[in-house]
Amino acid sequence: MLVSFFKDPEFANVDSSENESIPFRGTILRTKSGKFSSVSEPCVSCTTFNILAPIYKRLDQQNQNVRESDFRAFWLARNERIVDWLLYESSSIICLQEFWVGNEELVQMYEQRLGASGYDTFKLARTNNRGDGLLTAIHKEYFRVLNYRELLFNDFGDRVAQLLHVQSVIPFLQNNDHSMQQEILIVNTHLLFPHDSSLSIVRLHQVYKILQYLETYQRENKLNQVPVMLCGDWNGSKRGHVYKFLRSQGFVSSYDIAHEYTDSDHKWVSHRNHRGNICGVDFIWLRNPNKSIKPLKISWAEAAFGIIKYQLQKASLNEKDAFDFLRADNNGNYITYSDFCDALKQPKLTSLSHGLSFQEMKDLWVQADVDGNGVLDYDEFKRIWYCTCSEHIDEDSNSEDSNEGITKEAFGFAVKNAILFPREVEKGIWPENYHLSDHARLTALFSPVRLRCSQKRL
């Protein structure tokens, strides 16, 4: 088995699944006919790729303990080929997941080859010495890195995220007063795998932490008018709660925009998981500064209530039964806060190690208790059931802002194209001769655009 694996053409040359078409390199764009043409306007490209850490790559389905990490020739050859492709594409931004940070030889190989090709690299290990992590590379010809932050979730999955604040080296767009921010916020992350539905709240919580961190960073650095890119392996498809949560916060899937797919279209895949299932889980999310979005706490509450409803329905409870379940032994026709917390522990939504903290449960309760009388009546419960929350305005958000209502020119991106490799996955097919990873590479091409935005406080 191992001999045949080593002789695989994947390690000798470009496999047939990637021979027929080449990803755009730098500013090369594939037209709708499938041909490639040069792009005269300035563009930015971004690649996200879960490269499958050798410590997780199984070599023998009959013996799950045989991993690629035990065979240097195997993991080195595969990762050399990954870097070959990354350097050929020469994306402005590269975001890698399952980067084997625990192997110094592999780390040095990536850092040296990417560094020699003009990239600044940033790596981040998962917590608790998991062995893998993230690597983000920024091409110095396109961007200078103004700030780099690390976000440690310290949760059940030991997941992490990177935040990079970058500025274009050469302004994409010129304006008369030179006040337009031509900066981008980039996030690279890898969410927890949904081993069972009780972990849905953990994955949603990880995204909530990222968006909270982004919101705080933008407010502290007065960056309310910059585009945001979220890249990575989100371990969830377009049908999931995370997808809907990000859409509610103004983010769009670059690949779906490029191919004019709707939220209900499920035509592409990007991953074959260890169970043999294929699904689309890798995204490059874009949010331009002119997006009108709900307050983050409102979107979070609606998403969390959506998971609560899903869990209750999974237990075969309809609306009325769910209300009775939540009010527990209470004789009144209402739900108390204590009943609310105790009942939700049964679907495993609120344990501190797997889900919501005490404060987050309190925040959800505030959203649900519309009239603030300390209990939920049936009408208030229906708002939870149908995931519609009222906006509770913080006292300090009512202060007057002299800039409110003033429009200003801002910088954003339009999605020019996006491509998945190997190309078969774009049609929902996983090619058996593809072994570079258990994920497809996703590369998106963006062109800068001028936007008219309101001056708003974050």
Image (cartoon, grey):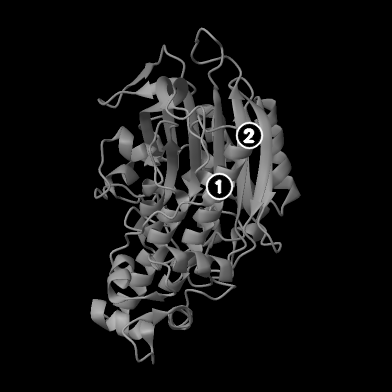
- Foreground mark, 1 or 2, reads 1
Q: How would you rate the neighbour count of disc 1 (Cα within 10 Å): few for under 14, some for 14-19, many for 20 or more?
A: few
Q: Position of residue 15 (x, y in %)?
A: 43, 40
Q: Which element carries disc 2, helix, strand or loop?
A: loop
Task: In the rendered view, tell whether residue 70 sits above or below residue 424.
Answer: below
- Tell whether label 2 touches label 1 (CB within 8 Å): no
| Mark with earlier residue (1, 2) | 2
Q: In the rendered structure, find residue 291 and report the number of the disc placed on it.
A: none
Residue highlighted by disc 1:
396
Q: Name the one closer to the observer, 360 or 240.
A: 360
Quadrant of residue 30 within the rendered picture = top left
- Disc 2 marks a residue whose amino acid type is Asn
Q: Which element carries disc 1, helix, strand or loop?
A: helix
Q: Position of residue 124 (x, y in %)?
A: 67, 48
**Is residue 4 toward the left or the right of residue 125 in the image?**
left
Task: In the rendered view, tell whether residue 61 sits above or below residue 215.
Answer: below
- Give the number of callouts: 2
Residue highlighted by disc 2:
221
For the point 41% across and 46% down, the residue is 249
Q: How would you rate the neighbour count of disc 2 (Cα within 10 Å): few for under 14, some for 14-19, many for 20 or more?
A: few
Residue 133 shows up from this direction:
yes
For the point 27% across and 83% down, the residue is 321
Q: Position of residue 4 (x, y in %)?
A: 50, 56
Tell me the distance, in whole angstroms, between the alpha carbons under discs 1 and 2: 19 Å
- Disc 1 marks a residue whose amino acid type is Asp
Residue 421 shows up from this direction:
no
